[in-house]
Amino acid sequence: MLSRRGSDAGFRWGCKLGLGFVTLEILLLFLYLETKTAAYIEEHHTHDPGRGNENIVSHSCIHDQILEQRKKPGHKIYSVTPQVYQESTTSKPLYRRGRALLGLSTFSVKQREAKQPIRIYLNYDAVGHSADRDCRNVGDIVKLGEPPVNSVPGSPLCNVHGEPPVFGDCWYNCTLEDISGEDKQQRLRKALGQTVEWFGKALAVEPVRGNLRLSGYSACGQDGGVQLPREYVEEGVANVDLVLLVTTRPTTGNTLAWAVACERDQWGRAIAGHVNVAPRHLTAEAETLLSATLIHEVMHVLGFDPHAFSHFRDERKRRRNKVTEQAMDEKIGRMVTRVVLPRVVMHSRFHYGAFSDNFTGLELEDGGGRGTSGSHWEKRLLMNEIMTGSVDTRSVVSKMTLALLEDSGWYEANYSMADHLDWGRNQGTNFVTLPCNLWKGAYHCNTSQFSGCTYNREAEGYCPIVSYSIDLPHWAQYFPQANKGGQSSLADYCTYFVAYSDGSCTDANSARPPDRMLGEVRGSDSRCMSSSLVRTRFMRGSTAQGNGCYQHRCVNKTLEVAVDGMWKACPEMGGPIQFPGFNGDLICPAYHELCSTVTMPASGQCPNSCNFNGDCVGGQCHCFLGFQGHDCSNRSCPGQCSGHGQCLANGMCLCDDRYAGIDCSTEVCDEQCSLHGGVCDNGKCEFRCSDYAGYTCQNSSVLLSTLSKCQDVLEIGHSGQHCAPSEPSVLQQLEEVVVMPNYHRLFPGGARKLINNLFHKQYDCDAAAKKLACWISIQKCDKDGDNRLRVCHSACQSYNKACGASLDCSDLTLFSGENEQGNQCTGSDEVSHIKPPRALDAIKQMLLMYRCRE
Ligand SMILES: [Zn+2]
C-alpha cells in the first residue's frame, strides 16, 4: 500500500504536462558523460612487463579504461532514480500514524530502520541473448566495445598480441571456449551467488522500502549494456537494494570480468549495475581466481569508482567535499592522488603503523601519467589487496577497502569480514611516504643475482629486474640505468622478491623437495630465513645460497626455529644462531616479524587504538563526530543534537522529522527535489553543474557559436556562464536529445497546435516554448560557477500565457520564486521579448504543421 502511494506521486508528476519526463531527460543528458578528470591516455598496455611475466594467473581490471570510454560522447548513460527509504519524508507521516496506533516507541522503530544486510539481486536474463555480442558458435564475429560504426564487421579484429595490440572497440573472433554452455553458466551462478552472500555479510545498507525502482530509460551498463526488463521499470523489484544484470560476453587478455554501476539513487548509491564475466575464464581451475575477481568487480559497482566518490556523504549526511586529494609529492617525484576519507586514513594508520601526521591519505593507482584514473589502490603499497589493479588467488580484502565503502555514507561495514593483509604491515610512515628504493628489509631487492625471502617469509623468491627498451619515467628510475626496473608498472617498477613457482616454504605440495643437506623442512609452520647452514663435510651449492625454509614456533614470547628437528631459541631482535652438525649460521628474524599477532606497538600508537572511533596521530586520539574520551570509547550526542532532535541515553541523536545526520544538523529536502534530479544537500535542493558528467559552467559567449537552436535565445543574456557539456559535439547532441523533445512537449503538434493558432494568436507560443525549452535545458550558473540557476518564475508564466498552458510555475525545484531577480534565475527578460506573430508567420506555421503530419 505504501509503495502504491509512492508510485502515484510519481505518476502525477509525469502527467503535469510531461514535465517529469522533461526533467528526466535533462537529467539523463546531464549524466551523459563522465567527469573529465584525467586527460592522459592509457598506455601501460603497451609496455607493461608485469603482465604475463608473473607465475600466478591474475585478473587485470579494465575499470579505468571503461570509465575513460564512458566519457566519450555516445549512449553510455547513468540515470538517477530516487528510491523510497524508511526515513523518507513522505513516508514519515504514515509511519508516524502507524506507530502511534501500534503503540511502539519511536526509538524501537528507529532501531528497526537502521542499516540491514545489503540485498543484491542477480538477473541472468541477458546471458546469451545479445546477438552481436555473445558468442554462440565457433567463428562468430562479435563486437567488443564499440567498433567504428562505418567499419566492415571483422575489422579491426581484436588482437592482444598485435603491435600495437587491438583489445577494445574491435571485432572478436569466437572460439569454443567463449561460448557459455550449461557447465559454465552453472559455475557463474555458483560464484556470483557466493559473491552476493559475501557482501550480505560484509555490508549493511539502509533498506529500500517497497520495490526498488529503476528508470530503464536506456540500456544499463557498458558495451551496449543490458536492457532492463520491463517489469523492473513498471513494477520495480521487491526486497532488493541493488540489481546486477549479468552477461557472459568475451573479453581480451587476462581480463576475467568487468562491472559498472548504471543507476544511482538520490543519494548517489548504486542501485543497478552490469557485470560481465568472460566464458573463457569460467573453468573449474579458475574458480578461486573468479571468486576474488567477482568481489573486486562488485566493489566497483558499490562505490570503488571515481564517479561514485563525488556522491559520497559524511556522517551528517552532507556531501563530502573531500574524498581524494591530488598533490605533487616531492619525495615520490610525481603527482599522487590519495584517498583522505577518515576511516580509510584511520585503518591505514593501524595497518602500516603510520601514526605521524606526515601520513595524510592512502594512494590510488593513478599518478605518474600511466593513464589510470583512480579505480584502484596503489599496488606498490597494497600489493595483494583485492582492490589493486590486478587480482590473483592470493588477493585479500583489507579493512581499508571496507572503510572506503563505509565512508561513502551508504554502507556500514562489518570489519570482521576483512582478511589479514601482510604487505606493509607495521612498516611505519616511511613505507607509505618514501619511494620504494628506500624501503627497508625484505621489501626491497636490488640485484637479480641472489635469491631471497619474500616479504612475508612464506616463500623463497628471486629479484626480477627488467631492462626495458625505453627509459622508465623519471620517478621510477631507481637504478643508474634509466631503463632498468621491476616488472610491474602497477607497483611503480619497484623491485622486491617474487616467489619462485616452486619456492613456497609453507605449501609442501607445490614446492621443490626440501634440501636435506641444509636441514630444511617445508610445511605450514616453515618460513624463509637467511642462512649459510650446511651439514658438516658438505659445501653449499651456489644456487641455494643465502636462504632456506625452516620450521618456527612462538613459545613463551620467544621465537624458536628448528633445523633437522632440533629447536633453538632466537634472540629477540633476531640474529645468527648455530646448530650442531652444521657449519654456518641461520639468521633468525626478529620476534615481532613472525610472532606478533596483534599490531606491533609502534611509536605514536594510541590508547585502545582509539576503539577505531577516531584517528590516531602521534599518540593522541582525534575522535570522529559522535565519539569522545581519551580513547574515543564514549558516544556523545554531538552539538546536543543541534536542537533538532532528542539525545538518547546511548549518546545517539533521534532527529526530528525534517532533520537528519549524526547531529541532526542536516535539513531534509522535499521529495520533489530528487524527482527532478536535484541532489539534496542540507535542505537545499542543489542542481550542481559539476554533478553531471562532462558538464561545466562555461562562459556563455563561448557556447553560443556551437549552439544552433538555442543560440538566439541565450544571446539575450549572454553575459555570465551557462552549464553545458564541455565538448562541442555533445553540446550539439544536447540540443537534439534534450532541447528539441522538451520543445515538442511544451508546444505539441496536432489539435493543440491548431487550437493555439486559432485562439492564442496574439502570443507567440512557438517562440515561448522554444525559449523555455532552451532555458530548462541549458541553465545559467551562479556567481560561484557551479550551481545551476533555476528557470525564472516569470519565464514560466509567460509561457503559460502565450500557450494557454497550465504549467506549475510554483514548482520551486524547477522555477525560481516569484520575487527572484534576473541575475538569480535563467531567462528573466522574456516578457518584453514576446512579439505577436505576424499573419504571414502564422500561415507558414500552419503549412509547416501540415507538412509534418503527412
Ligand atoms: Zn578494478
Image (spheres, rainbow, N blue to C red):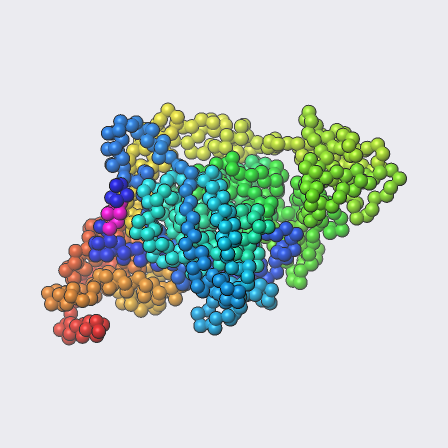
Front residue of 792 and 307: 307
Secondary structure of the magenta portion, mostly?
A: helix
> Which of the 4 image quarters holds residue 84?
top left
Residue 801 drawn above or below residue 357: below
Residue 3 drawn above or below residue 225: above
Which x, y percent locates residue 167?
54, 63
Please name the residue shown 27% across and 31% down the image.
99
Please name the residue shown 51% across and 59% down the image.
179
Which x, y percent locates residue 739?
29, 63
> Which of the 4 image quarters holds residue 6?
top left
Which x, y percent locates residue 427?
62, 39
Please name the residue shown 74% across and 32% down the image.
561
Q: Quadrant of the N terminus?
A: top left
Q: Which residues are magenta?
A: 6-11
Question: Is residue 349 within the magenta segment?
Answer: no
**Farthest residue in the left direction?**
759
**Farthest residue in the right direction?**
537
Q: Quadrant of the C terminus?
A: bottom left
Q: Is residue 691 left or right of residue 848?
A: right
Front residue of 204 and 476: 204
Which x, y percent locates residue 532?
80, 40
Residue 353 drawn above or below residue 753: above
Q: Is residue 495 left or right of residue 791?
A: right
Please name the residue shown 76% across and 51% down the image.
449
